[in-house]
Amino acid sequence: MKIKAYLKPQCGWSMGVRAIMDKYSLEYEDLDIINNQNIYAEMVEKSGQPLSPCVEIEGIMLADVSGEEVENYMLSNKLVESTDKEASAPIDAPCTDEEHERQAKATSEGSPVRFF
């Protein structure tokens, strides 16, 4: 199965998508939309909107989705089989307040978090 995931390096929603990929041991292309303007532009062009995460599975674009929504899509389309394995991160949650504070601190200390 060919999967392209347009994700932020640090983001609760993106971490949820990664957790689902790991839960089902799926190979996927993890595309950084924050540090690569061309990848961000590709995501916007393919999805028709600027929000992330976006996950393309076998040519079908799931735009602005959570890990939970990706999992539901794959299960309902029989792309994966149900498992009792737990996801390694919350699959339907934004960044924690602590993560937002860490990102703000990193930005103020010269490690920019870019948004195109």
Image (cartoon, rainbow, N blue to C red):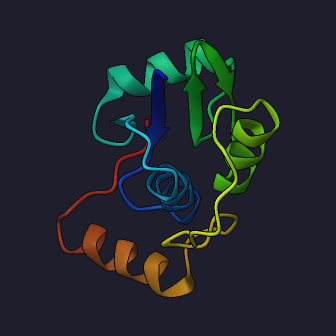
Q: Residue at x 19, y 63 (%)?
A: 111
Q: Residue at x 77, y 46 (%)?
A: 72
Q: Residue at x 57, y 73 (%)?
A: 86
Q: Is residue 37 left or right of residue 12?
A: left
Q: Foreground: 82 or 59?
A: 82
Quarter of the figure that contains the C terminus = top left
Q: Residue at x 70, y 64 (%)?
A: 92
The outermost residue toward the left is: 110
Give how far across and how far down residue 50 sits, in percent. 62, 31
Q: Foreground: 77 or 13?
A: 77
Up-down relation of residue 39 to residue 72 (above or below): above
The outermost residue toward the bottom is: 98
Give how far across and how far down residue 17 sits, in percent. 55, 52
Q: Total number of numbered labels?
A: 0
Give how far across and how far down residue 23 sits, in percent. 51, 59
Up-down relation of residue 92 to residue 43 (above or below): below
The outermost residue toward the right is: 76
Q: Is residue 35 left or right of residue 78?
A: left
Give how far across and how far down residue 84 sits, in percent. 64, 69
Give the quarter of the image for residue 77. top right
Q: Is residue 104 left or right of residue 66?
A: left
Up-down relation of residue 96 to residue 8 (above or below): below
